[in-house]
Amino acid sequence: MASSGARQCIRDVTAYLIFLILISTLGPLQFGFHLSELNTPQDVMTCAAQSVAEKVGSGPDTNLPQCIPMNEAQFAALSAMYVLGGFVGALFAGPTSTGYGRLLAMRVTSVFFIVGSSLETLAGTVPIMSFGRFLSGIGAGASTVIVPIYISEIAPPKERGLFGSMTQVTINIGILITQGLGFFLSKGSLWRIILAVGAGLGLLQGIGLVFVPESPAWLAAHKKPELAVKILQRIRGDVNSISEEIEAWDVPKSPSEEEAALLQEPEAPTRRDSTISKASSSKSVAHIGFFAIIRDPLYRPAIIAVIGIMFAQQFCGINSVMMYSVSLLKGVVSMSSAALTIMISVINLITTIACAPLADKIGRKACLLLSISGMGTSSLLLALSLRLEIKALSAISVLLFVAFFATGLGPVPFMMASELVGQEAVGATQSWALAGNYVATFIVAQFFPILNTWLNNRFGGKGWVYFGFTALAALSFAFVGVFVPETKWRKDADEVWGRSRRVD
């Protein structure tokens, strides 16, 4: 039986499906790319590095300044513009992808990436670069909403967890690409090449999307079931049956199928069958908006669940660890700060890939609980090691933090929205989820350094803030245990929540 299931899995994963995954995940890859594109070259581009000349250098374009003078507050504002753009993109991506299609929305994000990255590359002043970062942020925020939905709708049902984790994998690849480029190009005016690569990635995505079809599930929900079936069959391959996947779609039957249906003994539909049927048919005509969904008691548990998961992702402390891993490991490993950052990113990528199948094997909720408990334990170890000044334990704690993040809190939150609600509400739900993510990211990025310094000065020594992250991990564990249902192998949102819809 195991070998039969493995063979079926291999048959489901066609070359065409792999192509669609690769092209669509260029969006999340650019999210990671732009997130860290300024980290390594910061001193060079802001004229803070001693090796930077005060006059125009010989770079990609001699008409551009070799660096752009800015203080810490200006650089922080420059970074914040990306987060602000991501928040705006996340808000509008759901309604856009729901109303006009996943494909059009992804194509629009590629335009934002190209224009934003080009402005960043050619910028000679802080305002122009900030505007470019804002546009890139819109593309990034929208991509992290749209792409997980698209992947969940084209991936084979039994491998949705595996392919859903590709969002986080490609985010990590984007971070790693930026840091690798920064390691070699953070000198003179070569830092502009790093930003230009972002424009190239956007162009590559735009070209690739010319050959990508619309989501079959979206087409079926918008009264184009025949085209949806044709596309889905091509994705699955001719040898695979798609009958179970299209069971709820309103697909016109052929004469032979209608005759076979007439010969079958009629069966009285149950109340649940009829309610689900009516709900399914209604999906093609009604979509829930961003603000309407939070007022509907049917969807409110899903909104609470996805926002809570996104807050848990940030409040368990991953960004604080990634942000300060260099200083924590300095003196333990003999290498440059840039090389240390690359090492952490490589570990993050490897563990994310290695843990990708976990969501399909043990379930989404189990992955989240494992990840949160592991990160909480790692946070406690990190707090104690910093208090006791045990540098080796600090290094191990940081690596464990990254590894446990990859088991659940990294990939799973991006795939949950599409599994907790029906087609009519998935866009709005994903927008709420990513909006929550950006708000939580901003809170951690803005207040972690302040809180860390205050606690260290108040109580003396280092590491006090990680006791707080340990407590937040415990709260997150309780939240997921109570409010987040398991979605593994559930047929639809009604089955996930164990309910039948109302019949008017």
Image (cartoon, rainbow, N blue to C red):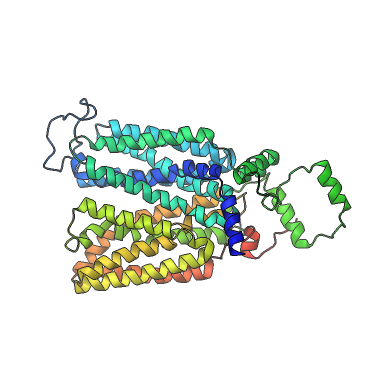
* Count of all numbered marks drawn on residues in the image: 0
Q: Is residue 340 left or right of residue 271?
A: left
Q: Is residue 232 left or right of residue 69?
A: right
Q: Which residue is the extreme one toward the top?
A: 63
Q: Residue at x 35, y 44 (%)?
A: 33
Among the 4 quarters of the image, the one containing residue 199: top left
Q: Is residue 201 left or right of residue 44?
A: right
- Front-most of residues 276 and 365: 365
In which quadrant will I find the C terminus? bottom right
Above or below: residue 202 compared with residue 359: above
Among the 4 quarters of the image, the one containing residue 266: bottom right
In which quadrant will I find the N terminus? bottom right
- Front-most of residues 358 and 381: 358
| Residue 503 shows in the view | no
- Front-most of residues 399 and 235: 235
Among the 4 quarters of the image, the one containing residue 196: top left
Residue 212 position, x and y percent, is: 54, 37
Q: Is residue 111 left or right of residue 42?
A: right
| Residue 436 shows in the view | yes
Above or below: residue 322 compared with residue 205: below
Residue 107 position, x and y percent, is: 49, 35
Residue 413 position, x and y percent, is: 47, 57
Residue 305 position, x and y percent, is: 52, 61
- Front-most of residues 264 and 450: 264
